[in-house]
Amino acid sequence: MGIKSKNPNVDKDGDFILRWKLDLPKKKKRSKDPFCDFTRDLLKELLDIVMLTYKGEDVKVDGFHFLNSVDIHKLYK
């Protein structure tokens, strides 16, 4: 006769509990403009999976500016 052990991956109703580790994001140097930081991070992540083109030719983007400003924000430092 064995001892019944409770499976730690199943709740009281018999449903499986999924667990995974969330890595803390790397500490990034932030500017005084959180919206600019958000936009930069979003664009960089997008550019990791897509290639922008102009008239069928690849375009390598290294910065951006908001439509209401001429200040250029670099994507890569």
Image (tube, rainbow, N blue to C red):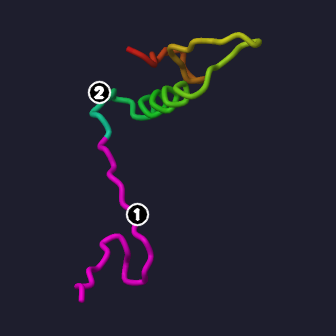
Secondary structure state at the residue bearing disc 1? loop
- 71 or 12, which lies in front? 12
**How far apart are the alpha carbons under marks 2 and 1?**
33 Å
Instruction: Name the spot of residue 15 as percent of width and height, x first.
Output: 44, 76
Q: Residue furthest bottom?
A: 1
Which residue does the numbered mark 1 point to in the structure image? 18
Instruction: Name the spot of residue 30 as percent of width and height, x first.
Output: 32, 29
Classify 10 Å Cα crowding around label 1: few (below 14), some (14-19), many (20 and above): few
Residue range highlighted in magenta: 1-24
Classify 10 Å Cα crowding around label 2: few (below 14), some (14-19), many (20 and above): few
Q: Is residue 75 above or below residue 35?
A: above
In the figure, residue 24 lies in which quadrant?
top left
Q: Nearer the viewer, mark 2 or mark 1?
A: 1
Which residue is located at x 33 percent, y 49 percent?
22
Instruction: Name the spot of residue 17 as percent of width and height, x first.
Output: 39, 69
Q: Is residue 42 above or below residue 22?
A: above
